[in-house]
Amino acid sequence: MKRFIAKLLFLAIIGTLPLNAARAQRQTSQETLIRNATVLTVTRGTLENTDVLLRNGKIAGVGKNLNASANARIIDGTGKFVMPGIIDCHSHSMLDTINEGTLAVTSMVRTEDVLNPNDVDLYRELAGGVTTLNLLHGSANPIGGLNTVVKIKYGRPAREFLFPGAMPGIKFALGENVKRSSTPNLPGVARRYPNTRMGVEEVIRDAFTRARDYKRTWDEYRAAVKNDKNVMPPRRDLQLEPLVEILEGKRYVHAHCYIASEILMLISLADEFGFKIKTFQHALEGYKVAKEIAAHGAGASIFADSWAYKIEAYDAIPYNAAIMTRAGVIVSMNSDSDERARRLNIEAAKAMHWGDLTEEQALKLITLNPAIQLGIQERVGSIEVGKDADIAIWNGHPFSVYSRVDTTIIDGVVYFDRAQDLARRPELAKERTALEQAEPNKPRPHGQSPQTPRRRPSGHEDDDMEKP
Amino acid sequence: MRILLALILLASPVFAQQIGYPTAQEGVVPPRGVFAIRNARIITVSGPDIENGTVVIRDGKIEAVGANVTVPTGAQTIDGNGLSVYPGMIDAGTNMGLVEVPQGANGTVDTSEVGELNPNAKAIVAVNPHSAHIAVTRVEGITNALTAPTGGLISGQAALINLLGTAPKEMAVVPQVALVINYPRIGFGGGGFGGFQQQQTANLSDILAANERQVDQVRKMLRDAEAYGRAQDAYAKDKSLPRPDRNVVLEPLVPYVRGEQPVMFRADREAEIRGAIKFAEEMKLKPIILGGNDAWKVANLLKEKNVPVILTGILSLPLREDDPYDALYENPAKLQAAGVRFCISTGDPGAEARNLAQYAGMAAAFGLSKADAVKAVTLYPAQIMNVADRLGSIEAGKMANLVVTDGDLLEIRSRIRYLFIDGRPVVLTSRHTELNDAFKNRK
């Protein structure tokens, strides 16, 4: 037990250091002035030798020779690049569990219930200039759980991560993962329906048919209760409520998909039931049906260049972003990986290399476009006065492989600062050595390992849950 | 007909403008010839950069390079104005051509044999020259790959190939370049948080004992190979001795146990790297570490023992939760500072090896010089694989594996404009450009 506590203490100390820094920062500075930087505004071009003023968590000024109050924190931006914080439209970071895979329809479960604010990968993502994540349920079922949009306020309690005003959403999924293509047949265990792309269509159709009836039942009740207070309300159905919200345009659908035919299937089904798909996630063959996606008004959130990791990814091409963008689809580059999330800047630049998008179009792939896809474009995604002070400061152009992030700021508060990180290392190393030599952490007799709290390993790449 | 058309095109002077662009050559290896790239910035890697230089290619080799090189008459020339010439990049840690689609298409997977000890599994036997991964990779400036088997303890023998050819034999630069051994892992399977999930039930002593038994299996086979080699030699000298049977499993091990050829140990964690070095020393092998995520922690030992490292984890998440966030980005810079020989690889099976430049670029963002970052994917891998006399830099006499770019080789926004492999001008098309062409204008 003593050892267990020591280990916990160790993790707690490690976990709280950035928190202390952030807290100190908050106390010392409500206002920040970045002077003389190159500012990639996204919506208003690139501004050279420009100041950016952050006040009360918002962008308060963008221009030349701005003034700040006497106690403002001043950052010399000479030679540096300021861009809006990167938005990752497909993440599973900080989720203690990702797939409720036992049923084909799990719209009753919420990722919001399993947030782990101490996931160290969050800090690593901040160090890549990422400030906002769309935390999605996995892709085990045609209709999955509800998503959560967060700002990476690493070091703060989970509830403070929630992005106020973000559109509620839900994960759908099509194709191999849903069919459980790589799940072995176990003796005595029945396979979960569906097993084919035909079955996937039927499951979604059935769910929306039930949701439509459920909505009608409630609509009828609401009409009746106006005249007769004694009418009994219908029984609430937590599975169907989110689907009714989709039918009413109050919840965004983020649909995992790969091949062209399944994209067309879902468009046609959504059109039939009168709802919209907000984003096709992955959409590796989106380029084959770009005009249909654009006509439906859907966006696409994709990988830059991953391909061939399974059969349904064999026709993926790195020109996907460019082809869909030119067809009028709002496209974003996502990570679906705690690792890749750290370098979405380069993933966006790849759309210039393959497909000749302009720098502004490429920048939008990780800023304004994912903001639109999450319904937060009034708050984040560009550097404009009045928007949230969520920015990343780079030591060079973010589309250069030679650049790295110096500072990441959310709501005006510094959550990552490379200089601070480097300065803290000797002290941390000393502390680590001391802890390792502490009695409770010494190797135990007979080779047993120290007890540690059970936790989800970092770095998982879940959506493609069957990936080894 | 197609071939005929290609020949006609090649014979015509128009070809000079067509170099590197699609002709009707698909499926046919383009012929060698005499080529000259003029007025280009030449990054020789082994020597100083040459502004406004010329590279002459003849019959597969670099014939001349310099600022004052005469273009031979009859050479097909490329105007290199505004362009840069680099040696082709080399990814020294792939399974290129051994796997097409890892999941859902087992029939395309030829990486891992049954059983623990397969020194006779040779990558060159199974490399699929027509894998879509090959063209997809080379059009990004990667001209060579080490392709390795992956299974068991002794995985087999890796090949160093040119990413061009219609048969494995045509592609081979060194058909058997190294023996690959998976040094037993101290972790508990999987990456992530030190396998802590399973550590609660595992007993470290048991695991170490099991690992030692695995090392013993390898040790025994290598000793057998030594004895086998001695017996064969003795019999060759003295035919009156009893004739030892030939053994296809032990025979390929002989040059490795004699230290004539390198042995690559897959090892990422500190304990594994130390274990591999110790084992190699005991067995008098010539070790290379493949993986090397913890190499920065063992830099002094690697330097002392002169063991090179093929780093495959630059873009992996740090092994431990409390490692610095940039521990693996910085790994190459730390090894460079300590004087350890290393090179940078994607470690990718093949499909994403095309991102090699990005791995090197990240290392340069975190402390490695830009020039060293280029070396880390050209000259350094060539040196580690003992082929620096043929590959890795732009020098007269070397194989003409060259990349002509419109910018910095490692920058993602740069484009490859021309590509030569084995002195052959390579058409810059792939499965991906073809699908792009097929769909980009769909109305």
Image (spheres, coloured by chain):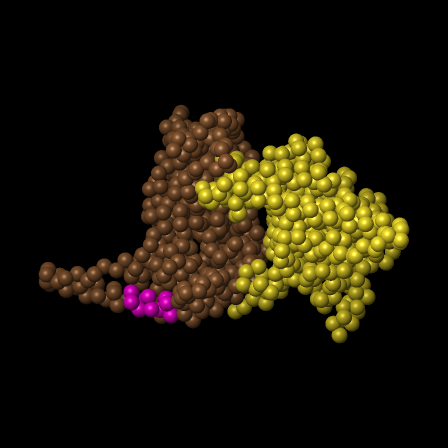
Q: What x and y, as percent, mark residue A162?
A: 35, 44
Q: What x and y, as percent, mark residue B397?
A: 83, 48
Kindly report the secondary structure that dominates the magenta region of the rendered protein: helix
Q: Nearer the viewer, residue A15 or B108?
A: B108
Q: Which chain is yellow?
A: B
Q: Is residue A441 above or below residue B176?
A: above
Q: Is residue A387 visible?
A: no
Q: Is residue B269 visible?
A: yes
For the point 55% across and 44% down, which residue is it? B316
Q: Is A210 covered by the magenta stretch?
A: yes
Locate residue A106 relative to residue B192 in the image: left or right.
left
Q: What x and y, as percent, mark residue B171?
A: 74, 58
The magenta-colored residue range is A200-211
Q: Which chain is brown?
A: A
Residue A230 placement: quadrant: bottom left
For the point 41% across and 70% down, which residue is it? A199
Locate residue A412 relative to residue B377 in the image: left or right.
left
For the point 46% across and 27% down, which residue is it? A439
